Image: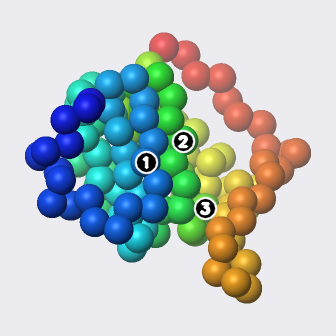
């Protein structure tokens, strides 16, 4: 994940960089995301790239990433065993209890998870 030469031209006005095992993800000033490194560990976000807009936060796990957009939607990619596939629980992650908002000074704020949301158990 240490070689960013393939995406170097995209890494302009970087706001944040996050690492997971063998990959990196950067949030740019416009809220888009650039990834590089081992594709199996989140270095390839092409399957969800169109959804990676208005991102204000990224969380890294073992071989996977989850991005939180300003509208509260959570987008994940990378190794499904490391959390890279959140499709089965997306309705819970995108609920009002996990919504993000912007304060009057345009800084992102994240609200806590609602107490009445129960996530299903996921079977592998």
SS of the residue under disc 1:
strand
Residue extending farthest to the right is 115
Question: In the image, is residue 116 above or below residue 3?
Answer: below
Q: Which element type, helix, strand or loop, lies under badge 2?
A: strand
Which residue corresponds to mark 1? 17
Q: Is residue 97 above or below residue 90?
A: below
Q: Earlier in the sequence, mark 1 or mark 3?
A: 1
Mark 1 residue crowding within 10 angstroms, few (<14) / some (14–19) / many (20+) = some
Disc on the earlier residue, 2 or 1: 1
Residue at the image point whose x is 58% and y is 22% from the top: 122
Q: Nearer the viewer, mark 2 or mark 1?
A: 1
The reply to whether discs 1 and 3 touch (Cβ–Cβ < 8 Å) is no
| Dot 2 alpha-carbon crowd within 10 angstroms: few under 14, some 14 to 19, many 20 or more | some
Cα distance between the residues tagged 1 and 3: 20 Å
- Residue 66 or residue 26, whichever sits in front: 26
Residue that carries the numbered disc 3 in the rendered image: 72
In percent of the image, x 35 and y 68: which residue is there?
13
The image's colouring method is rainbow
Please give the label number shown on residue 59: 2
* Residue at image coords 42%, 35%: 19
Q: Which comes before the other along the chain, label 2 or label 3?
A: 2
Task: Assign a secondary structure to mark 3.
Answer: loop
State whether residue 15 appears in this view.
yes
The quarter of the rendered structure image containing the N terminus is top left
**C-alpha span from label 2 to label 3:** 14 Å
How many neighbours does mark 3 have within 10 angstroms: few (below 14), some (14-19), or many (20 or more)? Answer: many
x 45%, y 42%: residue = 18
Rendering coords of residue 39 (x, y %): 23, 31
- On the picture, is 27 further left or further right than 68? left
Numbered tag placed on residue 97 in the rendering: none
Q: Nearer the viewer, mark 1 or mark 3?
A: 1
């Amino acid at each position: 994940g240490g070689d960013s030469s393939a995406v170097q031209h995209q890494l302009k006005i970087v706001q944040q960089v996050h690492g997971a095992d063998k990959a990196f993800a950067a949030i740019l000033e416009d809220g888009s995301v650039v990834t590089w490194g081992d594709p199996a560990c989140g270095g390839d976000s092409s399957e969800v790239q169109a959804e990676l807009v208005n991102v204000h936060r990224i969380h890294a796990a073992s071989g996977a990433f989850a991005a939180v957009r300003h509208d509260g939607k959570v987008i994940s990619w990378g190794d499904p065993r490391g959390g890279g596939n959140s499709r089965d629980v997306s309705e819970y992650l995108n609920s009002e209890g996990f919504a993000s908002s912007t304060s009057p000074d345009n800084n992102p704020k994240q609200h806590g998870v609602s107490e009445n949301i129960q996530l299903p158990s996921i079977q592998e």
